[in-house]
Image (cartoon, helix red, strand yellow):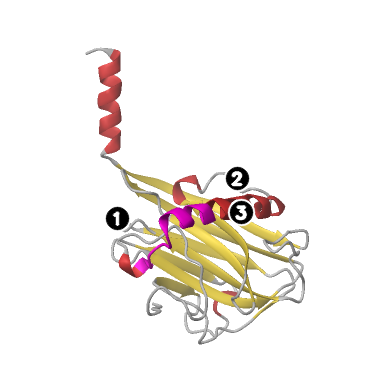
Amino acid sequence: MNRRLRRMLSGLLLGVLSTAGAPAAVVVSLDTSTTLLDLSLFTPGATYYAAWQLTGSGQVNNTASVSAFDLGGGTGLDRDAGDPLFGIFTLGPNAASDAGVWQSSATLDLLVNPLDSLSLYSQRFVAGTAFEFLVDFTTNQLAGFPPDAFTFQLYDGELETLLYEVSLDLLSAGEPIPEPSAWSLVLLGAAGLAAQFRRRRGRPKSPCTLKGAPRYERISRTTLPCTSVSR
């Protein structure tokens, strides 16, 4: 068997295998030098909505475990009935605590699987001088399908304006994240490309009408993808 044929057969074999990588960890951090998408700075005393999302291809199970929340001297606000929530997630150590992710030693596990391809949790806080958390991923992947993705979004306190976003596919989770001040430029450029794409292809469908959820979903109090479910 010649070298070229062996290489082709090897590629075909790799294409039908699933991968199950070890968990990867990423720290997401903002501070008073972070430029937001509206070109303002992350501001102490301002009220923000933090939103964590895990979106799946609808083919495999994956989990994003968020912990080590640090408000930098800020104040976490209690959970509210209007907070957008969706899919399967687990809060710890006390799932019933009104403090939610701001309780002491808090953990948030987001889960996607072939039946539930979007998990979303959000909660408000009053900013201090910094905001930081750690997220650990599982990296299960089925060949031929896009990798599942984790997204963190920061909104204003009324959920009207997206101010900051970090989106990572799980297979690239161990790669360095651009400095927060650079993200505004990266995302503004990406937003322009996305706008051109939407003009050509039309608006994306709701995750409820797709087998696999979109890579991320912008949230609001009134335009959730489906009925909110928390577990």
19 left or right, relative to 217: left
The C terminus lies in which quarter of the figure?
bottom left
The N terminus lies in which quarter of the figure?
top left
Tags 3 and 1 in contact by the CB under 8 Å rule? no
Tags 3 and 2 in contact by the CB under 8 Å rule? no
Q: In the image, what residue occupies the spot 53% across and 56% down?
A: 195
Q: Is residue 56 magenta?
A: no
Q: Of all residues shown, which one is farthest toward the front? A: 200
Which of the labelled discs sits on residue 11, or is there none? none
| Label 2 to label 1: alpha-carbon separation | 27 Å
On the image, the x and y values in percent for residue 96 come to: 48, 84
Please name the residue that numbered disc 2 is placed on.
176
Magenta segment: 194-207
Neighbours of disc 1 within 10 Å: few (<14), some (14-19), many (20+): many
Tags 2 and 1 in contact by the CB under 8 Å rule? no
Question: Which numbered disc, 2 or 1, marks the residue that appears first in the sequence?
Answer: 1
Amino acid type at mark 1? Gln
On the image, the x and y values in percent for residue 130 come to: 73, 65
On the image, the x and y values in percent for residue 77 come to: 63, 82
Please name the residue that numbered disc 1 is placed on.
59
226 left or right, relative to 181: left
| Circle 3 SS class | helix
Question: Which numbered disc, 3 or 2, marks the residue that appears first in the sequence?
Answer: 2
Q: Is residue 206 magenta?
A: yes
Q: Main secondary structure of the magenta part?
A: helix
Please name the residue that numbered disc 3 is placed on.
187
